[in-house]
Amino acid sequence: MKVLSIVGARPQFVKLAPIAEAFAATDHEHVIVHTGQHYDKNMSDVFFADLKIPAPDVHLGVGSGSHGVQTGAMLSAMDAVLDEHRPDWVLVYGDTNSTVAGALSAVKMHLPVAHLEAGLRSFNRRMPEEHNRVLTDHAADILLAPTQVAMDHLANEGLKERSRLVGDVMTDVCFRVRDAVQDKPFDLPFKQGEYLVATIHRPDNTDDPEHLAGIIEGLANAGRPVVLLAHPRLVAKCAEHGIKLERPDGSLHVREPLAYPEMVQAVLGSAGVVTDSGGLQKEAFLLGRVCTTLRPETEWVETVDSGWNVLTMDVSKLPELAARPAPSGERPTPYGDGHAADRVVAALAE
Ligand code: UD1
């Protein structure tokens, strides 16, 4: 079997890591195509190096642009690549512009498409990721779902026959890295358990200057030091609107985005997480740290139902929310056992 994976953005490299490892243990051929959606070293290369992912076989180098320009550049570059490789499966990941472009290129060429992390829904039609997920699920031939909730969404949309519950591949990689870094604290000027880890990058949070200024002010007044891992979009929008990230009182410790193992170390050493990222909400849960999510809804509803994650758009509540204790009792395991990637390979081979 020959499988061609299409990735392009940071969260997709994390999902690719366990899949590439699972393929490496078989005789199947695995081709990796990087669209170039994320191109900064710390948004791309370090993930390949740290997570031991083989270098991409093809790099499209599309870079940034409006949604139409970026997605269109990927579409026009993919035909020749798919024609050359003629894989048995095209595997697309998650919900970015690289996902929908990869899926659409492949169906147009009558190549079978598999969607990893299928069935997630926020039901928020303002999110570009929501369009990408829905369109990709309906274009794909096999839908590899991470959770029972995702399976239920797919069934509700008439896609039950094509859906398989495989578990969550991000759990595979999160547990593997956690075990490797467990006793190595990340070097920060704060005591273990004293600080919060924060990331903000969603257009709905960054693109309105007043809203963004409110979020940054809220983080600076969260009642604990905040390690803010600044995504390029956040840095660009703050510069554009004259919003200062550095604070004389040191309440915000601003850093560039971290490599994956460092991120896991930083979360393990923290009192909790404040974010609008999908992946980080779930990583906080998997690592046993409380999360406050600055969004009105989430795809990872299990983190909220179990009490580990709270959704809010009101940053003035951060001091109270970020200091809350972890829920008592055993943490549920809705995201599988850390062996989802093997089930993905088996489902495609079958
Ligand atoms: C994308 C995904 C989002 C995912 C996120 C993770 C879509 C629609 N969104 O959002 O689902 O959660 O990645 O990070 O696909 N930039 C750089 N260097 C880079 C990459 C981006 O400077 O390596 C800057 C560019 O100015 C770009 C902006 O960041 O315009 C946004 O990047 P883009 O890939 O368009 O979307 P993300 O916000 O990263």
Image (cartoon, rainbow, N blue to C red):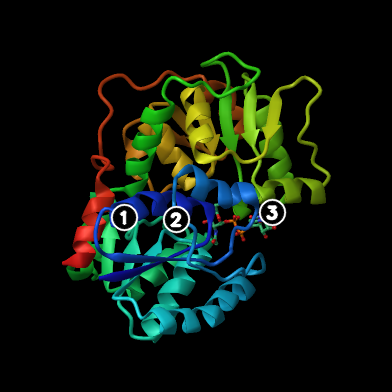
The answer to whether mark 2 is within 8 Å of ligand 1 is: no
Q: Nearer the viewer, residue 6 or 227?
A: 6
Q: Earlier in the sequence, mark 1 or mark 2?
A: 1
Above or below 161: residue 207: above
User: At x 47% / y 79%, what residue is drawn?
Assistant: 81
Residue 256: x %, y % from top left: 67, 39
| Residue under label 2 | 54
Residue 182: x %, y % from top left: 41, 23
Quadrant for the C terminus, please: bottom left
Task: Classify 10 Å Cα crowding around label 2: few (below 14), some (14-19), many (20 and above).
Answer: some
User: At x 26% / y 20%, what residue is drawn?
Assistant: 329
Q: Are marks 3 and 1 in contact (CB under 8 Å)?
A: no
Q: Earlier in the sequence, mark 3 or mark 1?
A: 1
**CA gap, disc 3 and disc 1:** 41 Å
Q: Earlier in the sequence, mark 3 or mark 2?
A: 2
Identified by mark 3, the residue type is Asp
